[in-house]
Image (cartoon, rainbow, N blue to C red):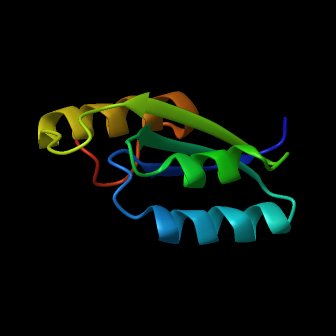
Amino acid sequence: MTARIAIVDAGSFILPYDFQLVKALAGRDEGVDFYGSTTRYNAEFLDAHAASAWVVVHARSISSSVASRIRVRGLTSACSRRCCGTLAGTPS
């Protein structure tokens, strides 16, 4: 089984940074699972991620304006448990 890298930005708060990081990793032929949310502003970033053969996008719909921190933490915890155990410092 080949190791994959999980990039988790549950609230999609830093998509320009995520995009450059995922692009660099995919350019090195690293498999990347990107976990984020869909909003009315980020479709081009998610589509660009999905266009790469090395990237799998896992997107969830959350509030496009004000997402509660509890809901965002819950999404982060669920994603991290599914892909790589638990993230250090992420509440379960």
Count of numbered circles on the image: 0
Q: Does 72 appear above or below 89? A: above
Residue 84 at x, y = what percent?
Answer: 55, 39
Which residue appears at 57% of the width and 55% of the height? Answer: 45
Which residue appears at 24% of the width and 40% of the height? Answer: 73
Which residue appears at 83% of the width and 67% of the height? Answer: 27
Front residue (pair 69, 80): 69
Relative to residue 52, is residue 72 drawn left or right?
A: left
Q: Does 59 appear above or below 10? A: above
Residue 15 seen in the current view: yes
Residue 42 at x, y = what percent?
Answer: 46, 51
Relative to residue 26, is residue 63 drawn left or right?
A: left
Residue 89 at x, y = what percent?
Answer: 28, 54
Picture quadrant of residue 69: top left
Residue 92 seen in the current view: no
Residue 87 at x, y = what percent?
Answer: 40, 48
Q: Quadrant of the C terminus?
A: top left
Relative to residue 84, is residue 42 drawn left or right?
A: left
Q: Does 24 appear above or below 30? A: below
Front residue (pair 57, 91): 57
